[in-house]
Image (spheres, grey):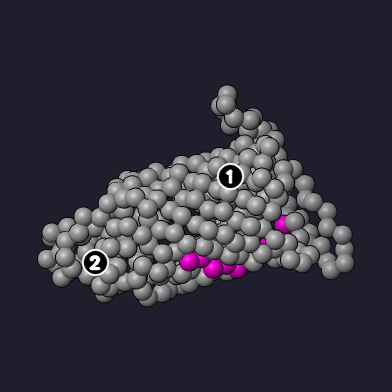
Amino acid sequence: MILLPRVAMAGEPVVTQEPVVTLPAPPFTLPFLPPISGDWTVSVGAGAEYKPDFEGARRYTVSPVPVFSIHRAGSPDRFRSPRDSAGITFLDMAGFRAGPAGKYVAPRTATDFAELRGLGDVNAAIELGGFLEYFPVDWLRGRVEVLQGFGGHHGVVANFSGDLILPVAPQWTLSGGPRFTAESTAATSPYFGITLAQAMASGLPAFNARGGAHSVGAGAQLRYQYNPQWEVHTYVEYQRLLGDAAASPLVQQRGSPNQVTVGLGASYSFNVRVK
């Protein structure tokens, strides 16, 4: 049975919730990781983003986005960026946090957008890998994710970010910093390459898109934490496409290398006990 905690009224002291879900321990353990048993804090939520129709597009649309993360209960409530892939923090010590991470990349359907006519569809992709982040001080974070694609692309994506984290008022936190992404050819080509057949069907010149530096940019987030369970956040992320992604005829003739995402979301945190 799942028991949801009562939300504190205004002026009432907030008490950190106890674990509300109990799960059986997994049938195995990994020797190089801490034991899975114990209490974990799970954060789930949803939001919406106003972002380009597809990567490299100049027109924008509104899309839903999920929020999900897990970390060991009792560890500090570390900063989370909306740009972070969903992850589970297995290692949390001496300012370092690490664990598996994953991301869903929506399919790109050519018939949905006039700019993609003749270019064919790109299936949905799942990117799986891991993250490592470091807090030299509480108000500064560096993070790197390395993800392998499956499905729509089979390349490797590496995301780098840094964030300055500033409490500006009780319950309010402002953060922001630089972003950089590098991709292998197998991750870039399905979205920005144009085969001879696609060139004939689309009217765009053929283009062999290779990997390398993919984008650079910056992001900022404003977070309001109502209590230890509920938070709301809004954010803006800007990226400038680089290399062959920016040079692709799809971007040069029908899109834009400048990509902006504006989002709003909310999340709820609760504890899970693994026995």
Q: Residue at x 45, y 44 (%)?
A: 146
State the mark number for residue 263. none
Distance (Cα) linking label 2 and label 1: 36 Å
Amino acid, disc 1: Glu
> Residue at label 2?
249
Q: Amino acid at mark 2?
A: Pro
> Nearest the camera: 275 or 260?
260
Instruction: Name the side, left or right, on which 179 lies relative to 227.
Output: left
Above or below, 67 relative to 34: below
Q: Earlier in the sequence, mark 2 or mark 1?
A: 1
Query: Residue sitting at 16 percent across and 65 percent down?
Result: 205
Q: Quadrant of residue 172?
A: bottom right
Q: Which residue is mark 1?
A: 133
Instruction: Judge whether residue 64 can be spotted in this image.
Output: no
Above/below status of 11 relative to 243: below
Magenta-colored span? 229-238
Instruction: Give yes or no for contact between labels 2 and 1 (Cβ–Cβ under 8 Å).
Output: no
Expressed as whole percent of the image width and height from the top left, the position of residue 148 reads 39, 43
Of residue 174 and residue 21, the one placed in the foreground of this image is 174
Q: Observer-nearest residue: 111 or 256?
A: 256
- Horizontal and vertical percent position of residue 73: 71, 43
Is residue 48 depicted above or below 38 in this figure?
below
- On the image, the x and y values in percent for residue 134 come to 61, 44
User: Is 234 covered by the magenta stretch?
Assistant: yes
Q: From the viewer's perspective, tell me whether residue 75 is left or right of residue 96.
A: right
Q: Residue at x 33, y 47 (%)?
A: 184
